[in-house]
Image (cartoon, rainbow, N blue to C red):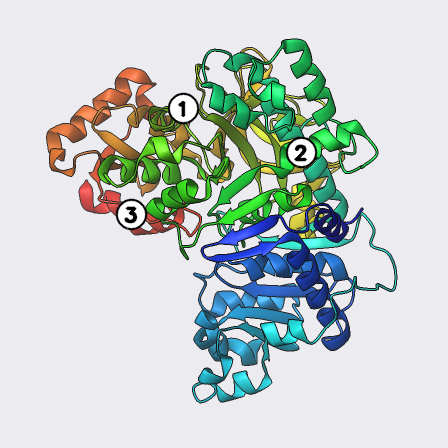
Amino acid sequence: MGLGELIADMAERYPKKLALIHGTKQLKYKELDQRTNRLANAFLHELKLKKGDHVGILLYNCIPYVEIYVASYKFGGAAFGINYRYRENEVTYIVNQSKAKVFIIGEEFLHLVNNCKDKFEFVEKIIVISEDLNKYQSEYPDLISDALDYEELIARHPDTKPELPEPLQDGDKAFLIYTGGTTGLPKGAIWVHGAIENLYRGGGLSGFLELFKNIFERLHDLKGKLKRKNYKQLLPIPISWFRFLPMPKSFGNRIIKKISAKDPTKTETKQGWISRSVQSRIKTMMHAPMFHFKGWLISNLPLFSGSTVVIASSKTFNPKEVLETLEKEGCNVFCTIGDKTVRDIIDVLKTDETLDPEKISKNLLIILSGAAPFSAASKQLWWDFFPNTMICDTVGQTEAVILPTIYVPGDELKSNQFDYLRDKIKIVDPATGEEVNPGEEGEGWFKMDALPTMKEYFGDKSKTAKTIKDGWLHSGDLYQVAEDGVHILLIGRIKETIVTGGEKIHPPEVEEVLNTHPSVYESVILGVPDPQWGYSVLGLIKLKNPEDASSELKEELIDYCKERMASYKKPRFIEFVKKFPSSPAGKIKRAELREKYKGYVETHV
């Protein structure tokens, strides 16, 4: 069953159920299916696109963003998003590198696209999403005269299922995600239909179904820790007596087996019915930009199982608006991006008296974090305000995804610790390709036939060959095998490792120590060029109380690190900052900080 057919199947099952919510705008499953059929037919018949053609998107998060992805699945093409903070040269590069034939933009980007459209090498048609496209005619006459209006285009075509010359195969492209990366130009990671179905269904390690199976496996640990109303929400199964009684372990085990059925879409199986009933009752809140893999993941994957996706209204990450939406929409699952976003949310809760954590958490059951480190300290901050929520800490990247670690209230919290399943993952010395021993560090390699991974980088055989070797995807991430040999710890990107005087220092390790100091709210560790040591460690600190900043506190923080780790790991320098620059996804922009402070040693020694 292709991805487009999964949406059609959900529309048949739940025609009146809300699929997408974005502020005051809503779209039911039947409407989503019909509108994406119209758009897919427009791609095929009016725009003459063929299987494998690419569609570019330059929008803020919105319902049409999801429609474009789904319509692309249906006609056999591949859509991709572009970072809305990119400038003309960056947009031009990606549009040309992708060989996009159609480019769909929001009216907010007319000025930018007007300035670079003549440099587009393959784009045959620009489509604009606008309330009134004609009002821009005088300002951008050439662009508007040749562009198509999104809603008018959809209205011209039938809502019947698109007829394709040949059926889609598992190996056909589904979408592209352009990586921001730590170095170099963005790369277009190709994901195919088969990999996404694997990501949705799971296979013992990864997937939307597998995620909820693992959540249910932890229910036995919740007895006596959550109120009865939380039980009812955690078990959204229409069995009335079960909603009001404690869960017998034997019954719970049967539920788990049914949830983990191989094909939960089959109507003739009891297993399929239970799986669908669990997932279709979930309402998921997301704020990550849809041009990022995390944004695609959370805006699309739940739709394949009949869940409702709530898209944050703000164009960029707004912690208060996120919290207000969680309460207003009664979301069960909140998807976010690691330490930075969680700490921003907690910061707002501490200072804004109009926000009530109890009301927000009335329906909230799970926080799912990914795409950035989520430390034990940040998890505890979350539990300080939302003590009855499960925490799902995921690890992955644009090129691959693996299963999260799940914490229930009362668990001992860990930073970036995950199961080490050696038949699917291995941690190796990149120089030798040999697996490292417990306590040692190495690069994470993911087995491509056992995990959902990208197929390749579009138009870049050289980078693909460096990343994929002998069926293993080389992540570029540094992991440590725990002493017990059954867990792995994500350390960080190999390229961000600081080498000072021949010793290696991993920023997340130092940041975690600094973040436990009572005066520190948030920290970033950078390696700054040093003529004597190669690089020196600079600690950038955001204080809980900015008025506490002093030279004495700088020395105290350095000593604090020295007492808790090897002396060479401590920061040589400390600087206090008011805030950190962040990306649309809420990630700290480390590259920008490295550029800003690259001459720090020369001016401070």
State which quadrant residue 551 falls in. Answer: top left
373 to 599, vertically: above or below: above
* Amino acid on which the number 1 mark rests in the picture: Ala
Q: Position of residue 549 (x, y in %)?
A: 14, 35
Name the residue tied to disc 2: 277
Q: Can you tell which mark lies on residue 376?
A: 1
Total of numbered circles in the picture? 3
Structural crowding at the residue carrying mark 2, measured as other residues with C-alpha within 10 Å and reported as few (<14), some (14–19) or many (≥20): some
5 and 523: which one is in front? 5
Q: Residue at x 53, y 69 (%)?
A: 105
Q: Position of residue 510 (x, y in %)?
A: 35, 27
**Residue under the point 30% across and 28% down:** 515
Does the image show residue 160? yes
For label 2, the SS is helix
Residue 374 vertical placement versus 422 (above, below): below
Which residue is found at the position 11% from the left and 28% from the top? 552
Residue topped by disc 3:
597
* Amino acid type of the residue tagged 2 in the rendering: Ser
CA distance separating discs 1 and 3:
28 Å
Image coords of residue 7 (percent x, y): 71, 50
Label disc, if present, on residue 19 of the rendered structure: none
What whole-number distance in Å separates the C-alpha atoms at marks 1 and 2?
Answer: 33 Å
Q: Residue furthest right?
A: 166
- Closer to the camera, 323 or 558? 323
- State whether residue 114 is above or below residue 23: below
Q: Which of marks 1 and 2 is nearer the N terminus?
A: 2
